[in-house]
Image (cartoon, rainbow, N blue to C red):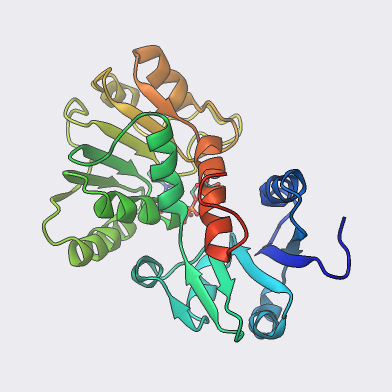
Amino acid sequence: MVIGSTELVAIVGSPIAQVKSPENFNNWFAAHGENLAMLPIDLHERSLEVFLDTLRGWQNLRGCVVTVPYKQRIAGCLDALSERAGALRSVNVIRRERDGRLVGDNVDGEGFLNAARQQGFAVAGKRALVVGAGGVGSAIAYSLGQAGIASLSLVDACNERSGALADLLGGAFPELPIESGAGASLAAFDLLVNASPVGMGDSGELPLPQALLDSLAPTAHVADVVTSPAITPLLAFARQRGCSIQTGPQMAIAQAGHLGHFMGVTPLQL
Ligand code: NAD
């Protein structure tokens, strides 16, 4: 129950009704007897700057998760950013310091790595293909670079996006071999990540042509960021092929501890 002394965290985006964080966090707070609560905030873009200024003065608020469409815009308005959030120019979580300063981080990629570890897959030294160079794909690719991936290939329907991500990663990880495109065969990849929305809903779509997917090694680990359905057409194919798989909901759950830990309201592993 929310009482006068309850401390708050929030999640801001628009729309907001679809997000799972409030039930996940509020269930965790209740189960652990914490006098904390999470509020969902559907914010009109015209109020973004006023909102951030209000957060600075909101003394019983510890932090705020940031979701679509504000991850990039908010990154440009905070008082400090983690190194990766600065490189990605995107945040998905804000901590309010006691003096009111707002500090941002992006833990999408850490959630991905945490989920991979939980599935028994270690990324160091592996060869990866990431499809989708948008917000989530960039964060995952950056975290793969930090975690010691051996090589990274990038595919995006928009060449400018994959090119911009390759430039960003080349600056951050000068030793990392970065390729554009999937090539003629997937046989050499240890990790395939779909970080595009392809496969959402009942579209039945695959993020790569079937003929190319047929070259995937059964030893590969295949991950999808799409949360609904949990088993996307890509993951259904990969499972049938004998690959280990990692779902979007597993990534979201694995990320919750990183969000809560950054705001100072949960441990890293929930
Ligand atoms: P975004 O719009 O920033 O990026 C998506 C990218 O995919 C774009 O660059 C686009 O050009 C590319 N793309 C679209 N269709 C493609 C195709 N057929 N082939 C190759 N590339 C294609 O979106 P985002 O914020 O990165 O989100 C991507 C997905 O991740 C969404 O479905 C979102 O719901 C999901 N997501 C999951 C989690 C999680 O924890 N599982 C967290 C955040 C977002």
Residue 134 sits in quarter? bottom left
Q: Nearer the viewer, residue 147 or 11?
A: 147
* Residue 240 higher or lower than 174, as above or below: above
Residue 99 sits in quarter? bottom right
Q: Nearer the viewer, residue 160 or 46?
A: 46
Image check: 179 left or right of 101? Answer: left
Can you say which quadrant of the picture contains the C terminus?
Answer: top right
Image check: 100 left or right of 33? Answer: left
Question: For the view shown, which residue lies furthest in the front direction?
Answer: 33
* Residue 195 seen by the camera: no
- Which residue is found at the position 51% from the left and 76% from the top? 103
Q: Position of residue 172 (x, y in %)?
A: 22, 65
Q: Nearer the viewer, residue 36 or 154?
A: 36
- Which residue is found at the position 65% from the left and 70% from the top? 62
* Residue 247 higher or lower than 170, as above or below: above
- Which residue is found at the position 53% from the left and 26% from the top? 231
Q: Position of residue 48 (x, y in %)?
A: 65, 78
- Which residue is found at the position 59% from the left and 60% from the top? 67
Can you say which quadrant of the picture contains the N terminus?
Answer: bottom right
* Residue 134 seen by the camera: yes
Image check: 36 left or right of 231? Answer: right
Q: Nearer the viewer, residue 197 or 1?
A: 1
